[in-house]
Image: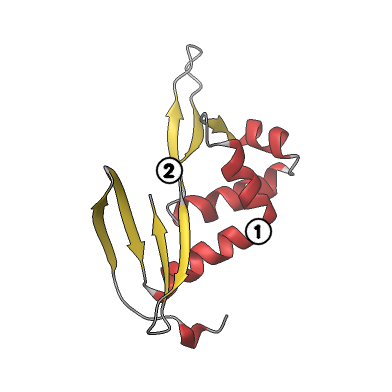
Amino acid sequence: MSKSSMASATVRTSEKSANDVQTIVAESAVQQFLDALNDAGCRAILDSTCEEALTATEISDTCDLPLSSTYRKLKILTEAGLLEERTRIRQSGKHASEYIQLVDDIVISLNPGGETEVWLS
């Protein structure tokens, strides 16, 4: 997909069936989502974090990814707004970051004007 087919615009949020739906049409944001979803490791991370929050080490083990790759992919996914980073409180005092998926559904469409849109709920 060429960048010229994507529009520069803003993020719109609307209410749809009691779910918050966010429409992304900004060229850089759409590309960021497409790049993240195009990566098999990122998709595996999204799948592993849909039910429970996991630490980077847990994600690395679950997805069979090197820890360094896991951290790079976590950064991509959190910057794209697909994962949320939280703090896991431990009694030992050594707290860890954990990650959980933020979206239930992602719909990518090409509207009649030739703009690519990403819908998140």
Q: Quadrant of residue 79?
A: bottom left
Q: How many marks?
A: 2
- Between 66 and 10, the residue placed more toward the observer is 10
Residue in the image at 61% along x and 37% along y? 48
User: Mark 1 sits on what residue?
Assistant: 39
Q: Position of residue 25 (x, y in %)?
A: 37, 71
In the rendered view, tell whether residue 55 sits above or below residue 9.
above
Residue in the image at 64% along x and 36% along y? 59
On residue 24, the disc is none
Classify mark 2: helix, strand or loop: loop
Q: Position of residue 101 (x, y in %)?
A: 48, 41
Please say if the residues under marks 1 and 2 sit with CB atoms less than 8 Å apart: no
Q: Position of residue 87 (x, y in %)?
A: 43, 30
Residue in the image at 71% along x and 39% along y? 63
- Between 105 and 37, the residue placed more toward the observer is 105
Which color scheme does this rendered protein use? Answer: secondary structure
- Between 101 and 65, the residue placed more toward the observer is 101
Q: Earlier in the sequence, mark 1 or mark 2?
A: 1
Residue in the image at 28% along x and 46% along y? 17
Q: Amino acid at mark 2?
A: Leu
Circle 1 crowding by C-alpha within 10 Å: few under 14, some 14–19, many from 20: few
* The N terminus: image quadrant: bottom right
On residue 102, the disc is 2
